[in-house]
Image (tube, rainbow, N blue to C red):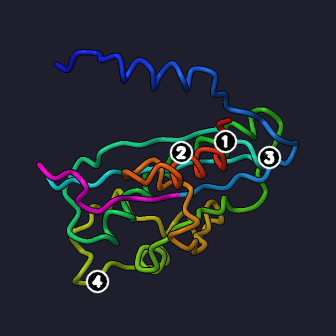
Amino acid sequence: MMACSEESYEISEAHADLKLISADNNFELVAFVDADWAGDVDGRKSTSGYLFRLGQSTVSWSSKKQASVALSSTEAEYISAAYASQEAVWLRQLLDDLGVPVTHPVVMYEDNQGCIKLASSEKMNARTKHIDIRHHLCDLINHDVIEFVYCQTDKMIADALTKPLPRPKFEELRTVMGIV
């Protein structure tokens, strides 16, 4: 167990006044999905991260280590997208229950072209048959629940949830998330 140092206290004290803000009345639900492939140096597991925004307001996010070792960056991103898709289904239902029906697919920004292509595929092939069926996303795409859109890696907000970043980039993404 690591002891609390003065330095860590100062860092947490300096950020104690950060708040999550709600910016507008736009009710478009979008997600940013990312993974770091084999980022855990000990177990080689990847970290999944996603962030959902309702308009300009962040409403849901997650960062967690994946349960299994991904064999490629595409697989790591695909597993992350599967986690995010479960949250998208739940958020759509919550919004509907609150009287704000989501009438369009939830746009899920993804920075891995292989993941987007795999998610749109009707069937698995020899290179992807090892990916667990519970991660298959094609049905959600076909039923207009989610839609993948490519996002350049340098614009991926969810990077802050999956990997260590240089301080200026982390602070930039923190601000974009609405944490000020």
Q: Earlier in the sequence, mark 3 or mark 4?
A: 3
Which residue does the image show at 67% across and 55% down from the upper left?
Answer: 30
Tell which tag, 2 or 1, sits nearer the viewer: 1
User: Which residue is denoted by mark 3 in the rendering?
Assistant: 101
Residue 85 in view in this figure: no
**Element under disc 1:** strand
Q: Is residue 103 left or right of residue 105?
A: right
Distance between the Cα atoms at labels 3 and 4?
36 Å
Query: Farthest residue toward the bottom?
Result: 126
In the rendered structure, which segment of residues is drawn in magenta? 33-42
Q: Where the C terminus falls, by quadrant?
A: top right
Label 3, residues with CA under 10 Å away: few <14, some 14-19, many ≥20: few
Label 4, residues with CA under 10 Å away: few <14, some 14-19, many ≥20: few
Q: Which mark is residue 58?
A: 1
Distance between the Cα atoms at labels 2 and 1?
13 Å
Residue 160: x %, y % from top left: 48, 50
